[in-house]
Image (cartoon, rainbow, N blue to C red):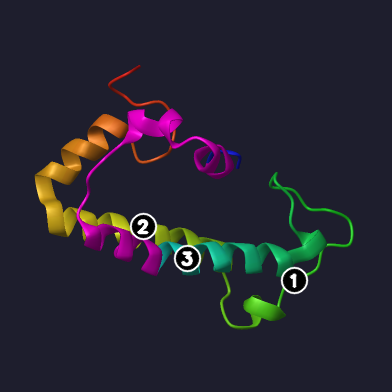
Amino acid sequence: MLAPIVYVVNTRWFSFAAQDPPVWTGSIGIAFLAPAIWLLLRAHADLDHNWSPALEIIEGHRLATDGIYGIICHAVYAAVWLTVIPQAVMIDRSGDEYRAYRGRTGVIPGPSKANG
């Protein structure tokens, strides 16, 4: 959560992650990730006290049928799938180059596989 703030303060600290991707990749990412983030936040807000970080039934739980859950049954899963779509687009557009990149870095943010 602090990384964007730190980046604004001093961009040189993130020079290790410098890349030169094609311009269209940012557009694809924004087109899918912005709605995914909105959907995830909306889903959590609509769940209110029915959401917990652990899979558990809390006293007073009720079925969420209002808000986004009045439209989408599994809103959190839908948000996750929106993040999967850019992966498929990247594989389609860049093929083996993207597969190799993903193999070096991993799909989930964290330490690079190449760096241990």
Q: Amino acid at mark 1?
A: Leu
Question: Is the residue 31 above or below the residue 21 in the image?
Answer: below
First along the sequence among labels 1 and 3: 3
- Could you tell me the amino acid type at mark 2? Val
| Mark-to-mark CA distance, 1 and 3 | 27 Å
Query: Of all residues shown, which one is farthest toward the top?
Result: 116
Label number found at residue 84: 2
**How far from the left and from the top, in percent, is residue 9?**
55, 38
Marks 1, 2: nearer the viewer = 2
Q: Residue 74, how many percent across, how many down?
A: 56, 68
Residue at mark 1:
63
Residue ID at (74%, 48%): 56
Report the magenta residues as a range. Answer: 4-31
- Tell me the amino acid under the disc marked 3: Ala
Q: Where is the N terminus found, in terms of image quarters? A: top right
Q: Secondary structure at mark 3?
A: helix
Does label 1 or label 2 sit earlier along the sequence?
Answer: 1
Q: Is residue 19 above or below residue 61?
A: above
Report if residue 73 lies within the magenta region: no
Most extreme residue toward the right is 60
- Residue 30 lies in what quarter of the image? bottom left
The single residue placed furthest to the left in the displayed view is 96
Residue 10 vs 112, above or below: the answer is below
- Looking at the image, is mark 1 or mark 3 nearer the viewer? 3
Nearer the observer, 82 or 9: 9
Horizontally, is 39 left or right of 81 in the view?
Answer: right
- Circle 2: element type: helix
Q: Is 11 contained in the magenta span?
A: yes
- Find residue 34 and name its label: 3
C-alpha separation, residue under disc 1 versus residue under disc 2: 27 Å
